[in-house]
Image: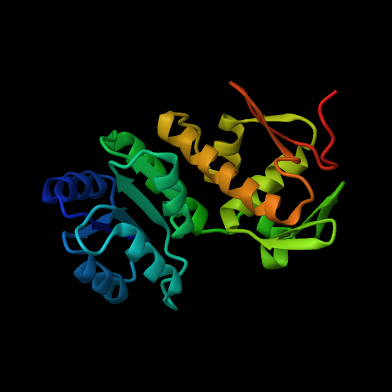
Amino acid sequence: MNTILIIDDDISICELVKINLELCGYNAIYSTDPVKGFALILQENPSLVILDVMMGKVSGFDVAKKIRRTEGIEKTPIIMLTALSELNNKLEGFNSGIDDYLTKPFEIEELKARVLALLNRSGQEMSSLRVKEVLSKGDITLIPESYSVQIVDKTAQLTPIEFEILNVLMQKEGSMVSSAELLKEVWGYSNEGIDTVDTIRVHITHLRAKINKISSEKNKYIKTIYGGGYRLLANGAEDK
């Protein structure tokens, strides 16, 4: 049975999430204190952590970073719950190492879908990471062994999710990939709501920033198709 740890200083949210997860067959535990919550992670080694951001002196960002730096729990999937909805706050969350993001107030069915998708994904390697061959198109080379991307002769390190997004875009190079397709291929579900679209947008923003640092021109390779999705142009050429 998967154990899921909830860390949130609002006990009513902890109880609500715990009851609903237990109805799905999970073993759910919680802490309203981030310091004690981190101790529980070390003690229980949960399959997934649901983490609030605003918790007094120790934020959820701090806890996420600590998880990612701690051997033995560094790969634990993290879903962040927060009332902070600005893009910069979401970027800070993903920079801290979280896997997914839900803005309060949230629908409990949406949370359960995210939990299931993350547990499914963490239980098996992502499809692209099972393929050990280097994928190269135009200026871009993806190196699965190190989760890295090379643009011409410069390299940047990616997170597994960023790597998977770029892999999907490269597989369909030149064609539009919708948000719904990315959700299905990368996250493993198709519930396309405001939060899920925002999650993709934040990851794309972060991915672009890393590519911009190693490319000769900003925003050269990943194009946003407004109202549609994203297109990768492996040579950085403009649309004709």
Q: Residue furthest left?
A: 12
Residue 76 x/y as whole percent: 42, 64
Pick the residue in front: 69 or 132. 69
Q: Is residue 208 above or below residue 105?
A: below
* Residue at the image point whose x is 31% and y is 75% from the top: 42
* Residue at the image point whose x is 27% and y is 52% from the top: 52
Pick the residue in front: 191 or 196. 196
* Residue at the image point whose x is 30% and y is 70% from the top: 41
* Residue at the image point whose x is 71% and y is 44% from the top: 218
Give the side of residue 229 with respect to residue 83, left or right. Answer: right
Q: How is the image coloured?
A: rainbow
Give the side of residue 64 with respect to residue 149, left or right. Answer: left
Q: Is residue 64 above or below residue 45?
A: above
Q: Quadrant of residue 108?
A: top left
Q: Residue furthest bottom?
A: 71
Q: Is residue 55 above or below residue 36?
A: above
Residue 194 x/y as whole percent: 42, 29
Q: Quadrant of residue 102?
A: top left
Residue 63 x/y as whole percent: 33, 65
Q: Quadrant of residue 47?
A: bottom left
Specify the quadrant that holds the C terminus. top right
Count of numbered labels shown in the rendering: 0
Specify the quadrant that holds the N terminus. bottom left
Residue 33 x/y as whole percent: 17, 63
